[in-house]
Image (cartoon, rainbow, N blue to C red):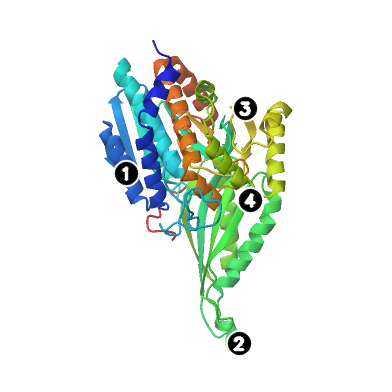
Amino acid sequence: MESLAAFVEQYVEARRERLIALSEEIWRYAEVGFQEFQSAKALERFLEEEGFTVQKGVAGIPTAFVATYGSGKPAIGFLGEYDALFDLSQQAGSTDRALFENGTAGHGCGHNELGVGSLAAAVAVKDYMQEHGLAGTVAYYGCPAEEDGSGKMFMAKAGIFDGLDGALTWHPSSKNAVDGCSSLACIGVLYRFHGRATHAAGQPHLGRSALDACELMNVGVNYLREHMIQEARIHYAYRDAGGAAPNVVQDHAALYYFIRAPKVAQAVELRERVDNCARGAALMTGTTLEMTTTDGLCDFVPNQTLSQLLQQGLEQVGAPHFTQEQTALASQFQKGYPAAELQAKQASYEEDYGPEIARRLEGKPLMDLVLPLRFDPKASPGSTDVGDVSYVCPTAQLNMATYAIGTPGHSWQLTAQSGCGIGHEGMLAAAKVMAHAAINAMEHPEILEQAKAEYEKATGGKYLCPVPDDTKPMLDGVQ
């Protein structure tokens, strides 16, 4: 009997051209969060052609969907994303800044590859189930607005992931490694202050400044920083500065805050303290306050049992097989990056994986080796709504090389590589690794039982949603 690695290799490669074409199609659409209408339709169409049953518009989100094949237990889910980022339009494969004609957005985080890679894994598992009579359910979750909107949180809140025995996903990266690091929980809150306009010189005593309220809130939060846990992060932006005229007391102004902490319960607690700063600012200025929770997400809890399965698959499949042309192109991208950044990246490999691995990677534009599995007790400084799924069921995540070492995240350089062969090779390799892990899990229910026990110990077996019950997705953009 052929090996599992050989099976997934054969069935993913059989669809290579179709999968690449689908990824390039979504790359061209470059639709931002909750606006991924064409991208979602393209993914849904492909899955329907492969025999999946597709439920569209789940959780009240038009661009969210679930595609399933089979029935009963075990049930394994793959998470797909397909939203782009504003202001990152770029021509595919171009090492010079050159906008693509699809508009201002671009796939500067590689979610065109992410969505299709997870889809390819789901389809390969379906093929295996058909050929080997394997019982159970394989599901693909179309998850919108990861970048800004927390689509998975709204899906988790609606119970969309309930009943899964395990969830797998991946993310484009410069390295080939299983993600054994947590992330920060994050809550987004819009604080709108309403005051009273008047002439700033002639009748200032009649005015109540909403802008003053924003300023005072920021001062309060800045003093709060000394008295919160070291790992927490709070940052903000003005969404409304009240107008351009200095001789008018501003009667409206707004701040948008992100409140982050290593655990979702900590973020919820810290959010209340930030709210109190806003309430105090309104009281001091005689203004009124309107608080709107825009979105929120949990910290990611990597399931070690499923992570070890992914690592086995990664070691079986190996690193992406980049061509000489792709390696040369990645080298051209690297030449545009600051030398200090490349040196820092090299130093991070030595710190995380030791001097021998760092030596093997020195001077390479693309990672061509598999990194060992490691679990870091410290949370990474970023946030992802994959964390919400990890509070619903055992969840593991893979990183696969799809761009040159040293490429900045959320950059036009990453957009360029997401639309060409470098990204495609990593995407297909990720699909094979995830399919390998999922089939192993489905064929060995005792592994899923172990993963469940670990999940329950780590999370309490209960999803703690970071936002109030009445929070709705921002389907039409920022509130």
Q: CA distance from mark 1 to mark 4?
A: 34 Å
Disc with the residue nearer the chain's start (4 vs 3): 4
For the residue labelled by badge 4, is the local secondary structure a helix, a strand or a loop? loop
In the rendered view, tell whether residue 121 sits above or below residue 220: above
Q: Which residue is mark 4?
A: 336
Q: Residue at x 64, y 32 (%)?
A: 377
Q: Which mark is residue 286?
A: none
Q: Quadrant of residue 139?
A: top left
- Amino acid carrying mark 4 in the image: Gly
Cβ–Cβ below 8 Å for labels 4 and 3? no
Q: Position of residue 382 (x, y in %)?
A: 58, 44
Q: Quadrant of residue 347?
A: top right
Q: Which residue is mark 1?
A: 42
For the residue labelled by badge 3, is the local secondary structure a helix, a strand or a loop? loop
Disc with the residue nearer the chain's start (2 vs 1): 1
Crowdedness near tag 2: few (<14), some (14–19) or many (≥20) residues, C-alpha within 10 Å:
few
Cβ–Cβ below 8 Å for labels 3 and 2? no
Q: Which residue is mark 3?
A: 374
In the rendered view, tell whether residue 305 sits above or below residue 459: above
Relative placement, left or right, of 343 versus 7 is right
Disc with the residue nearer the chain's start (1 vs 4): 1
Q: Which residue is mark 2?
A: 201
